[in-house]
Amino acid sequence: MLKAEAQWIGQILREIDAKQLSPLLNVGSATADFRENVQPWIDSEIFAPLRERGVTVHHLDIRKDVGVDLCGDLTDDAFVAGLAGMYRSLLCCNLLEHVPDPAAIAGKLESVVPPGGLLIVTVPNRFPWHPDPIDTLYRPTPAELAGIFQRCRMIRGEVIKCGTGWDYVEHNPLRMLSKVWHRVAARREYGGMKGTTSFFPWLFRQFRQACLLFEKKGTN
């Protein structure tokens, strides 16, 4: 998650009454270490304020690890059905570019919250290839992203500027070389060319995120 993206989400959440949010399901959560140490702005901008407000948050990921409360696969209908009715709101960030059929997953996310429930969804709008384990290069506009959430109405949708690659290596050439090495390794593992060959232009190209707030419509 990018810093400006986390700030946008945090501001949106602050504008919503805690009773409308709790309990909240964080889909594609990654680990506690990732949220608190690797990208500490995730916790400081989003989850620490929610804890202070008494909002219950459950973290869901496909991989079991420390800080993951629920482990499951969103393509598993039985697993998703077990989530339905348990949450008033849902957060899904930087997940839909990593699945073969984002529209199908959008439908699964919609089924989790009740009518009137809230969903915050973010997807890269302009960002380099980053396999986890795949990246389909799905880079929607807010309107395109809203189009796959057919049971929701968009309350707010924006494209957020999120800095450049140079910002995220802290203007440090050694960090930059480390990033390059990891991308070369990913190219070898996944057979991808685009991400590595386009890395250097991204050092100075603006990252952008499509960030949307949805409300589920009044019928299931």
Image: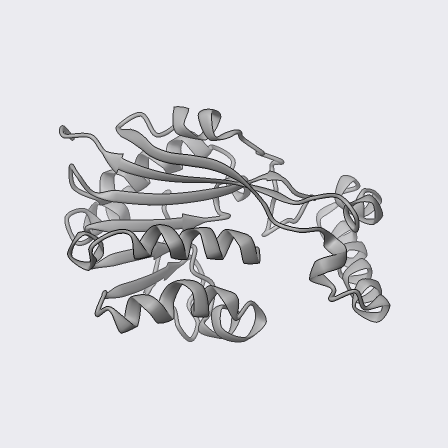
Q: Is residue 9 left or right of residue 178?
A: left
Colour mapping: one colour
Residue 108 lies in what quarter of the image?
A: top left
Residue 21 or residue 35, whichever sits in front: 21
On the image, the x and y values in percent for residue 119 come to: 31, 43
On the image, the x and y values in percent for residue 132 come to: 59, 52
Residue at the (34%, 68%) spot, across then down: 49
Quarter holding the C terminus is: top left
The number of numbered badges drawn on the structure is: 0
Residue 147 lies in what quarter of the image?
A: top left
On the image, the x and y values in percent for residue 67 come to: 39, 73
Residue 40 or residue 59, whichever sits in front: 40
Residue 10 or residue 105, whichever sits in front: 10
Q: Is residue 41 left or right of residue 106?
A: right
Residue at the (19%, 50%) spot, across then down: 88
Residue 148 lies in what quarter of the image?
A: top left
Q: Is residue 85 above or below residue 26?
A: above
The answer to whether any part of residue 45 appears in the image is yes
Quarter holding the N terminus is: bottom right
Q: Is residue 110 above or below residue 173?
A: above
Residue 123 or residue 191, whichever sits in front: 123
Residue at the (28%, 42%) spot, across then down: 77
Q: Is residue 133 left or right of residue 184?
A: left
The answer to whether any part of residue 1 appears in the image is no
On the image, the x and y values in percent for residue 182 come to: 76, 61
